[in-house]
Amino acid sequence: MILLTNLILASSSPRRKMLLQQLHLDFSIIHSNVDESIDRKVSPECVVTDLATRKALAVADDYHSSYVIGSDTVVAQGDHILEKPKDKEEAKKMLSQLSGITHSVFTGVAVIFEGQQEVFYEKTDVTFWELTEQEILNYIETGEPYDKAGGYGIQALGALFVKEIKGDYASVVGLPISKLYRTLKKMGYPSLRV
Ligand SMILES: Cc1cn([C@H]2C[C@H](O)[C@@H](COP(=O)(O)OP(=O)(O)OP(=O)(O)O)O2)c(=O)[nH]c1=O
């Protein structure tokens, strides 16, 4: 097992990688490959903290002396949890559901180091403009919705749908780096730049 750093991001998300790079730390990426099936009767905060913990634990089992970060993001509209749309129909349904209303984006984070475990979540409220059917169809054609919770990316074309956001922008994109930084500090992570 070759490991160059003692910070590991247990994620395949290019957005999480990009956000963690903002901390100017060396880190490795190891995909966690956990079963991401969820219990839809459970609250979104429980879903994201549970999945984040599962992702971190799956990697931490092999890397005890590293700080391992797992994370998960879902969109919640009322009692409905929206994950990543599987196809065009599902993407259309999700975006139609989000049109003209406020929904919440939940991101859970788990950091594990030598048996210590810190788990938290961020909730950010996002309000969409009313979207026309044509806008939704055109957006789906770009392919942007498919690997993103709720079927949109606030960091890309999806930004055009956003009227207002209350909370942490980075958390919507997939990793609340401000709170993560504070958590690493609390856990004694040694190489923080600030
Ligand atoms: C709402 C929203 C979500 N997303 C992304 C963040 C996450 O990558 C994705 C939600 O899926 P996740 O299952 O949380 O993450 P993932 O499968 O991409 O990566 P991994 O499990 O390996 O860590 O949606 C955006 O990029 N922009 C947005 O505006």
Image (cartoon, rainbow, N blue to C red):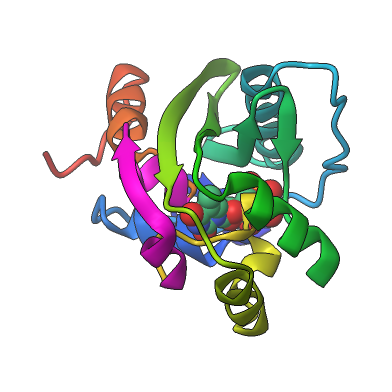
At x 88%, y 38%, the residue is 37
Residue in the foreground of this view, choosing between 176 and 78: 78
The image shows residue 139, relative to residue 18, as above or below, that is below
Residue in the foreground of this view, choosing between 146 and 24: 146
The image shows residue 14, relative to residue 82, as above or below, that is below
Q: Is 181 placed left or right of 98 in the picture?
A: left
The magenta stretch is 157-173
Question: Is residue 165 on the magenta stretch?
Answer: yes
At x 28%, y 25%, the residue is 182
Q: Is 44 placed left or right of 104 in the picture?
A: right
At x 61%, y 69%, the residue is 136
Percent from the top left, x then y, of residue 89?
Answer: 84, 65
Quadrant into which the C terminus falls: top left
Q: Is 161 placed left or right of 69 in the picture?
A: left
User: Residue 145 appears in which quarter of the rendering?
Assistant: bottom right
Res 133 seen here: yes
